[in-house]
Amino acid sequence: MPPLNPPNNSQQTNTNANTITATKTPSQQRIEALSKALTGIRKCTREAHKSADNISRTGRVLNSLTSPATDHSAKLAAAARNLQEVQLQMTKAREMMECAVDCEPPITQLLQSAKSLQKATMMRKAQEKNKGVTSDTEMKELDAGEGDLNVMGSIIDVDQDVVDEAKMMMEALKDAYLYFDERKVMKNSDLRMDEIKNLYNRGVAGMCILINVKLSDAGKAIRLKKTTYSTRESAQQTRNRLTTALNDRTLLQSVGEYEEFLPFNRDEVHFQRVIFETLGDTNPRLAKLARSASLANKPSNTEDDSKAGPHTKVLNSNIDTGYMHLDTYAKTRKVQAYNAIDGYYRKLNNERKEEVARNSSDADDFDLEARDVVRCFEHAMVVIVGEQTVFRNVVAPSAVRGFEDGDFTENYRAALSSAYSHVAACVMERVVRIVDSTFYKQAKAAAGSVLGAGAASAAGLRILDGVRILGPTLAKHCDLSDQKAGMIKTEESKAASNLCIELHRVTVKGCQKAMENLTANIIDDPLEGARYRPSNAGVASVSSEVVTAVRMISKFTSAYKTVSKRRALSWDPQTGDSAGDLDAFSKYIVSKLCKNLEEKSKYYLKDGGFVAVGKRHIFMIVNMHFLLEKLKAPSQQFSGRKSRRVPVSSDLDGEEDYKITGSWFKQKVGGILEKEKAAYLDIWQSLNEHIVQVESGINEKDRVSIIMFSLVTISCVQFSV
């Protein structure tokens, strides 16, 4: 058995510790356990911190290694997106570049079909008029190098499908043009834009040819009414009819022998609307695509300008709105509108010549011509309203819709107004020329004639009466400048309205000139000659002609007031509200007549002897009595009584039995009458004395002459008294 090892110090220490522990309380033991646990935790924490630091350092190293790769990846992604966008742009550019090639066949077909239709229409019209085929030059201009077209078969027309397809191609060309206009940095963009522009212009030309053919072939926008008024109305009847219609707001139904109507059916209206909507793009960058060109023929000048006046500016001018289709519309419809008013005027001229041939009175001829001029006013209103119907149904709808959507520019709306005004102005210009030429011809025909000048004055006032009643309504229809309708007012759009003002001015000026000619003819009425100074000292022709002239003019007191308000007359220099009425004119011409009669009476003295002196006074007595009998109002007019009142110059128009009620007339004419009667009685007293004293000293022949003249004188004096 081995010997037992002696206990060492450590064992002894442990033994002691265990002995000590065994002697500790449980609380102390738990505290010591917790302390040992905390010591272990601190050791683990230090180890964890070391591990975290190592991980952080490793992360920083890894991050420094991966960041460049991430940046490169982002750049690669952006480059990929850019490449995709470039690819899309290249695809879009390729499509736009091929647009001209794809759009060319439909547009070429449209242009050829339009030219074929135009040629067929021209040949058909030529055959209808039996004037043969148009000239080779015109045909070559229509061909324009497009090849030989067969137009001798059946009636050729352009299908709606052709127009619809061309419309789609035109829209594609617009998009392509705008695409290259926004990307001018692209190579060959200018070249592509030129190609698109040329092709687009061919499409515009084809559509404008269709506009020209359709609007021209439709004819006039008027037709005969089923029931019409009498064409042989008097001035009073015409005034009553128009005034009543104006008050009842039925003027358009009451004027003219024709009425307005739309010369297109529903399909034709739709056909033309498609064209106007296609060409009515108001993008400023697209405006230069459409070239302005003249397709419609200018109406011929059918009258001598030296006689008709200078009012031919609109008729002989071209319109340039900046939009080819609107120019074509205006030029085409202008021809139809002009032919409508011109043909009607010529028809009236021919009818009037036949009517005048049955009645040789110059006064009636002047009145008939004035009646026909007023009928031309009414017809012009119907023609303008008809053209307004065409404009509103064919041209204006796209403008109205575009305006409501806010797409239409100010320039396009102004162009619409100018185009319509150009058509209406052509009608108004022809009317102004008709009025101007009428005054010119009547003034020439009435030269040197008091009765003719009076009839011309009355005719001029009848014309002015029509202008006064119809003018405001006519001007309203000439002006379509309305913001609600998508149109605005410009100087060009006021052309027709300005001609309405010119019509009023020309008519007023013509009336003034006619009345001045009347007064001049009275003053210059010849003093010698049996026709002007009757040998029997009776009523002079100038006296009866003046009475007739006053009565003719008295039917138009309102028209005369219009002249006196606007023109300073030699007998009435006041204008406006202070201007005089017809009484002032009557006073002037009566005074000039009395002066002329006094000068005529002096020529009786050339015969010599007391008989010549007596004739002089008898001549004045007879003529003054004639004026009083024909023009002086009855005695009741001056007595202040209200019953049986005679119409005066300030009353309504149209009184046949016109009487001068001014006190000046009784004083002037009655004073001359009393003066001449007294002078004549003095001569008669001397004659009686001589007859008693020389009764036995004269021969039988002289005695008979004196007795006969005395009897005539006594009869005249008694008649005048």
Image (cartoon, helix red, strand yellow):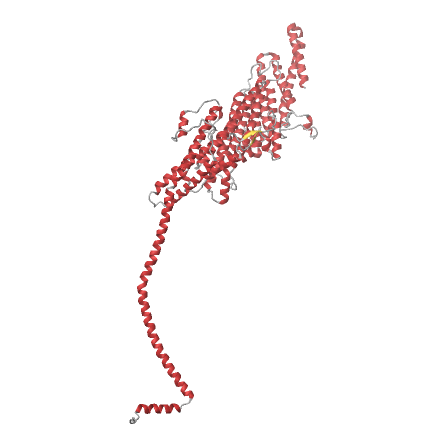
Q: 548 or 674, which lies in front?
A: 548
Q: Which quadrant of the figure contains the C terminus?
A: top right
- Vertical side of 167 occupied by 303: above or below: above
Say which residue appears at 33% left-offset and 73% top-offset: 51
Residue 575 visible: no
State the image coordinates of residue 307 (x, y, percent, origin top left). 48, 24
- Vertical side of 405 occupied by 450: above or below: above
Image quadrant in which you'd find residue 247 = top right
State the image coordinates of residue 331 (x, y, percent, origin top left). 46, 32
Q: 444 or 259, which lies in front?
A: 259
Residue 619 visible: yes
The reply, left or right, for residue 2 in relation to residue 583 is left
Q: 638 or 222, which lies in front?
A: 222
Q: Which quadrant of the figure contains the N terminus?
A: bottom left
Count of picture labels: 0
State the image coordinates of residue 396 (x, y, percent, origin top left). 50, 38
